[in-house]
Structure formats: C-alpha cells, structure tokens
Amino acid sequence: MIAALLLLAGGFGLLLVGAEILVRSAAALALRLGISPLIVGLTVVSLGTSSPELVVSLQAALQGASGVAIGNVVGSNICNIGLVLGLSALIRPLAAQVQLIRLDVPVMIASSVVLFGLLIDSRVSRLEAVPLLLGIAVYVFNTIRQSRRESRAATARVAASTPHLRIAGVRLGLDLLLIGSGLALLAWGSDLFVEAAVRLAELLGVSRTVVGLTVVAFGTSLP
C-alpha cells in the first residue's frame, strides 16, 4: 500500500511539473504570436491543462485499464466544475464573457450529452471516436477564427500585465523545447500514476472505474 501511494505521489508530482512547464511556455508562445487572451484560455491553456487527463487516459487504454481511462475523463470534468471553479469563485467572484455563455458553455453541455449517448452500450468504439476528434478540431478552428475579431491592443495589455507568461528574448526554439519537455514529463508521470492507481484498485478491492473517477480524476484535475 505504501509503495503504491509513493508511486502515486511521484507520478502526480511529474504531472504537475510537466503541466506547469507546458502551459506557461505554450501561453507565452501564443501571446507572442498575437493570439487573444480569451482564445489562449479556451485553446492553449485548456488543452495544456487537459494534457494530464489525455496522457493518463491514453496510458490506461494501452494497459487495458479502460475503467481508469473513462472514469478519469468523467471524474475530471466533475472536478473541473465542482472543485476548480468552486474554489476559484470562492476566492474571488468570476465574471464570464458573453461569448463564453452563448457558445462555449452550450458546447460543453452538448459534449456531455454526446458522451452519455456513446456510453449507453458501456463502450466507446473506434468508429465513435471519429466524431469526437472531428468535433474538437472544428471547435478549436472556429475559436481561433473568432479570435481575429479581438483587438491586438487587448492582447498587448494582458501580455504586459502577466509577465510570467512572457519570456523576454527567448526564441521560438526554446519555447518549443520547453513544450516538448513538459510533454515528456507528463508522459512519464502518467505511466507512474496509472500503474499506482491500478495497484490501489487491486489492494482496496474496488473497481478501476471508481479509482479513475476519484483518485485519478482529482490528481489530473489539479494542474
């Protein structure tokens, strides 16, 4: 039990560091390229902070632990709304832009409804994966296209007010190197995290889905 917990903690630590490096470097690169702050949040940061869920679920799928993979996806979305949004709003009230309410929230709800429909037969097939991937591609493309309507002045103001997102004088190559390093740490951490989660499930006598919905989902949502 202790060994599994230590392995879980080590994997989580790597996930946290990897996500931090990935998000900071990707956001800095996006702002330098003139992408608007809202779009950075909806695409670069959201995809970056979702990378722990992605690599953990991929690793779980490769190991045949489908319960961990699906449980992680569902549990992480619950944690993002209940825990992440709840704690953030508790610290300071959050204001949402109109675009977020009219477009992005309905897309999030629609995605959950689609997932519910796909899981009626208790599985997600390769054929069913295609519309999911096409859907996220269309969403990201449409979001980036809309970003062109925002003024570059707003982008400059946010970039100036968030110096931690800018690395002055750093070339494109270093940004890409940092992004690659973050992804490598995420891959390593996910391998340890999934292995530890499966061990815990066996030791505690609970299903892998329950571990994915709780321990794994909580851990991958914290970044």
Image (cartoon, rainbow, N blue to C red):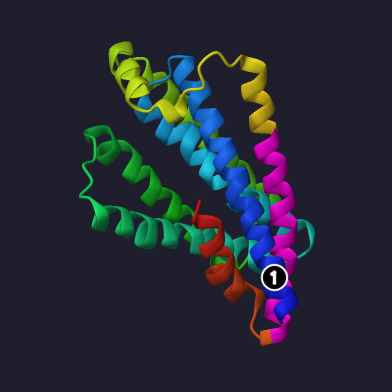
In the image, residue 110 sits, relative to residue 24, either above or below, namely: below
Give neighbour class at mark 1: few <14, some 14-19, many 20+ (Cα, 10 Å): some
Residue at image location 53% in from the left, 71% down from the top: 214
Q: Which residue is mark 1?
A: 6
In the image, residue 176 sits, relative to residue 10, either above or below, namely: above
Residue at image location 38% in from the left, 43% down from the top: 107
From the top left corner, tell me how far across and down residue 183 is, in percent. Answer: 68, 40
Please state the extent of the stretch shown in magenta in the rendering. 181-203
Total numbered labels: 1
From the top left corner, tell me how far across and down residue 61 is, in percent. Answer: 73, 58
- Asked if residue 193 lies in the magenta stretch, the reply is yes
In the image, residue 210 sits, relative to residue 129, either above or below, namely: below
Is residue 118 visible to us here? no
Identify which residue, 42 or 111, lies in the foreground: 42
- Asked if residue 78 lies in the magenta stretch, the reply is no
Q: Mark 1 is on which residue type?
A: Leu
From the top left corner, tell me how far across and down residue 34 is, in percent. Answer: 43, 14
**Of all residues shown, which one is farthest toward the bottom?**
205
Residue at image location 32% in from the left, 59% down from the top: 87
Magenta region, main secondary structure? helix
Is residue 25 visible to us here? yes
Callout 1: SS: helix
Identify which residue, 99 or 133, lies in the foreground: 99
Asked if residue 112 lies left or right of residue 203, the reply is: left
